[in-house]
Amino acid sequence: EPDVLDKPDAQDLPPAVGKVDLRAVNFQYRDSTPRVLHDVDLHIQAGTTIALVGPTGAGKTTIARLIARLYEVSSGCVCIDDIDVRRVTQTSLRRQTGIVPQDPFLFSGTIEQNIRFGLPHAPDDKVSEAARLSNAHQFIADLPDGYQTKVLEGAANLSVGQRQLICIARAALAEPRILILDEATSSVDTMTEAMIQEALQRLLSGRTAIVIAHRLSTIRNADLICVVDRGRIVQQGTHQELHDQLGLYRTLYDEQFNLDGDGSG
Ligand code: ADP
């Protein structure tokens, strides 16, 4: 549905360092729909992880989509290394921005083809390297057909956790400078959860990462937490800074995490 076109004089985005800035961004999906982002200013240092937290419908996914230029701002701008994303070719932007969606999409084909998605000519050793880094190699190797295992309709032959690991491997193979991650909320068993967390920490390390965060461990490890509420960034800081304030973060935190028995503060 997005309707974004390259400008006639669009240039390739040079290899990115990975600084991301949103400057006075306003956004509405269509002229006829209400504005969903209001005056958003967000500055992300290259190589750091920011966590976007906030209630459902606050605008977190929209912010992530604008950074990947899946949509264009209504006013203001999104810049990568101080270059307005509207001035660069989409191909060059896609090469350097990876997205791991919440409900990762696997198509019917082999596991290997799914990992190679977007990079069909990547050498085999790169594929297995990416799978190892993502903690996916072991379970794939244990399947009777290994990397050639066919993904069935709806990925019914794979568990939710396995699908997530494959999608992490896909992102690891592409080596994007900027990674956008919509953390899955669906629960997986504790061991798979630990494998996913470990794989994500490896994947995020050294990259600029924007995580729509649902897990306390991700939020605690983030360099900066941005609290989004009704289309505005209402708080920014580290976990400790925000926890010490009586604000939305504290409320969300108390509601979501203390109940899990994981919220010692
Ligand atoms: P969050 O990720 O914080 O749950 P979203 O960014 O998905 O929030 O949504 C922000 C607002 O934008 C919501 O009011 C939502 O209904 C609206 N919205 C999201 N996607 C679209 C779309 N494709 N078209 C129109 N409105 C949308």
Image (cartoon, helix red, strand yellow):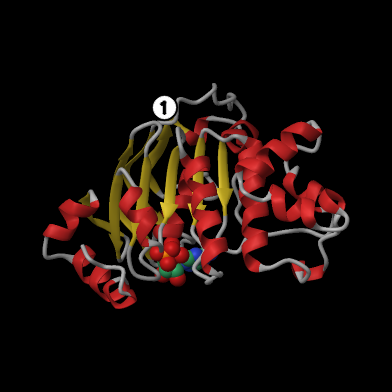
Nearest to the observer: residue 18 or residue 85 = 18
Can residue 46 be seen by looking at this rendering? yes
Left or right of 253: which side holds 96?
right
Quadrant assignment for the N terminus:
bottom right
Q: Which of 36 and 205 lies nearest the eye of the viewer?
A: 205
Q: Tell me which image quadrant ligand 1 sits in.
A: bottom left
Q: Is mark 1 within 8 Å of ligand 1?
A: no
At mark 1, the secondary structure is loop
Q: In this view, does 43 lie above or below 135?
A: above
> Which percent across, then down, holds residue 30?
49, 61
- Graded by Cα atoms within 10 Å as few (under 14), some (14 to 19) or many (20 or more), the crowding at tag 1 reads some
Q: Where is residue 22 in the image (x, y as percent from the top left)?
A: 35, 41
- In the picture of the structure, the residue carrying the numbered disc 1 is 81
Query: Which quadrant is the C terminus positioned in?
Result: bottom left
Q: How many numbered discs?
A: 1
Amino acid type assigned to the residue bearing label 1 in the image: Asp
- Taking 235 as reference, is 248 above or below it? below
Estimate the x, y position of residue 36 in percent, counting from the top left.
38, 62
Q: Which residue is drawn at 37% across and 56% down?
A: 217
